[in-house]
Image: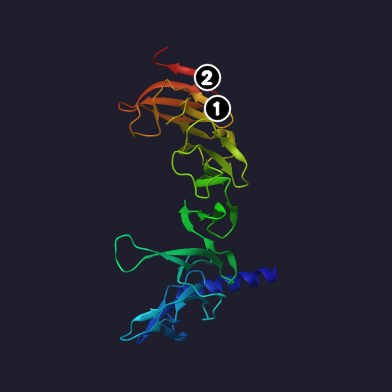
Amino acid sequence: MKKLLTLLFIALSINAISQTLEKFADGYKYGFKDKATKKIIIPAKYTSVLEFIDGINAVTESKLGSPNMVVEQKWKIIDTKGKEISPDEFDLVQIKKNGLAFVYKLNKTEDNPSGYSYGKAIYKIGIMKKDGTYLFPCELDNISEMGKDYYRIFSNETGVGVISIKGTVIIAPQQKFDVKEYIGCDLFSYTNQDPNRKAAVGNGAIGGIIDAKLNIIMNQDSIDFCPSTIINSKDCSNKKNLFGLTGGKASNKGIYRVGFGLVVPISYKLSAGNSGGFHTFEVKPNVIEIYETMRKKLIAKYDWNGKLIFSIDK
């Protein structure tokens, strides 16, 4: 117990220090000092610095030309004492919360089709932890936010994966799925990939739902599934309570319930909101209600198993 309290104190102390350090300038160089005491903690020797987040920062000691023009810039990651913790230098760095750093290395420069003298820089991206070790080496081609809890990572060579904002690998990059978005309770919508292609399949591909262990919760191989319309995703105590909307080229349009199939048929021209459809729907405890979009008039009810309870046509 004592050891646990000691580790907690150290962690809190590191975070407190990172919040009280402020940047200061000495000529063209920057360092950090204690905000309260003004004591210099890290000498002004860097030509560019970022802000400390959760105990780490990115700094560069760029080589300067004349008059004070940067001719070479490589970034390193330091802790709150100024110690370099990264084993490599990088062309770009983004410091994230939870002690993660996205690090970029220039891979190549493509010709600029507009005719300007400079080209388009293509980077390989890595993810580094605050202890200086790599979660992923600089082999990724893209990282994007997926909700507030996850990042979607992509590599041309290995495929698509998911990590949490705390650095936990949820889905290792692979070609089996192109994970599109987080929909709640560690459930992810996905689209199937063409096995003959390295790149991810774009919008309109066949999709479904997987959990964090890659179990297929809802596999819509035969319909055009719209993962953005998943509802009841916040209450996942029973994954059978998930519903999705089908459309596009689907032969069986309507509301699908996970594990049960179509529960509201094509006879209603459904939309997930007021986006052009004639009818909208709401899933309530044990009941699915269908409304006329314009007048908000209730026109039908189904139970969760697809049995018609009420209809103005009946």
Q: Is residue 2 left or right of residue 291?
A: right
Marks 1/2: CA–CA distance:
13 Å
- Residue 261's disc number: 1
Q: Residue 259 at what x, y percent from top left?
A: 59, 30
| Pick the front one: 233 or 49 | 49
Sequence-wise, which precedes: disc 1 or disc 2?
1
Q: Residue furthest top?
A: 314
In the rendered image, the quadrant that contains the C terminus is top left
User: Image point 29% across, 61% down: which residue?
Assistant: 114
Closest to the observer: 92 or 129? 92
Residue kind at label 2, given as amino acid type = Lys
Return the x and y of residue 11 as percentages of the image width and height. 58, 71
Residue 120, x across and y down, in percent? 38, 64
Q: Which residue is mark 2?
A: 307
Residue 69 position, x and y percent, is: 33, 82
Residue 97 visible at all = no
Q: Work out whether residue 133 can be spotted.
A: yes
Residue 250 vertical position relative to residue 55 in the rendered view, above or below: above
Q: Relative to 66, does residue 261 appear above or below in the rendering?
A: above
Image color mode:
rainbow
Is 154 placed left or right of 247 in the picture?
Answer: right
Q: Secondary structure at mark 2?
A: loop
User: Which residue is more in the foreground, 69 or 306?
Assistant: 69
Does 304 appear above or below 184?
above
Q: Residues within 10 Å of mark 1 (few under 14, many from 20)?
A: some
Q: Amino acid at mark 1?
A: Gly
Q: From the viewer's side, name the closer residue of 83 and 87.
A: 87
Mark 2 surroundings within 10 Å by alpha-carbon count, few (fewer than 14), some (14 through 19), many (20 or more) = few
